[in-house]
Image: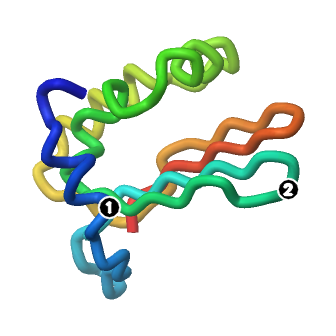
Amino acid sequence: MASCPYTWVRGFFSSGTKSAPGEPAKNLMVRVVRDGEERVRVALPSRSAKWLIELIPADVVRKIREEAIPLDAITDDLNQQEILYPRPIFSLSEPGRQVTVWLE
């Protein structure tokens, strides 16, 4: 997170507006549901996806990797794209918690 502190600050003030179909993504969206209740819904600038691993808490990164979600490959793919378009990035489901990350 140290390499992109602006991302977190801007995320709290982001408008959360969606991209029009066919246009580049405006936001990296993160949603966390615990016990059926939405606890976190954050809109960060879409370029934040380039620092995806740094934005996710270490315990969640570990669980993502345990679920065989190719987080490093996903991050590499995002870093290679010149323009980021709306799409799902990944979701992690475990008892009592659902984490969903996508570009919109």
For mark 2, does the 10 Å Cα neighbourhood hold few (<14), some (14 to 19), or many (20 or more) residues? few
Please tell me which residue is depicted at 15% across the width and 36% down the height of the picture.
Answer: 4
Residue 36 numbered mark, or none: 2
Please tell me which residue is depicted at 57% across the width and 16% down the height of the picture.
Answer: 59
- Which three-letter amino acid code belongs to the residue tagged 2? Gly
Q: Secondary structure at mark 2?
A: loop
Looking at the image, residue 74 lies above or below residue 59: below
| Circle 2/circle 1 CB separation < 8 Å | no
Q: Residue furthest bottom?
A: 20
Residue 42 is left or right of residue 51, and the answer is right
Q: Quadrant of residue 65?
A: top right
Please tell me which residue is depicted at 88% across the width and 33% down the height of the picture.
Answer: 95
Q: Secondary structure at mark 1?
A: helix
Q: Position of residue 70 (x, y in %)?
A: 50, 23
Looking at the image, residue 13 lies above or below residue 70: below
Residue that numbered label 1 is attached to: 12
Mark-to-mark CA distance, 2 and 1: 23 Å
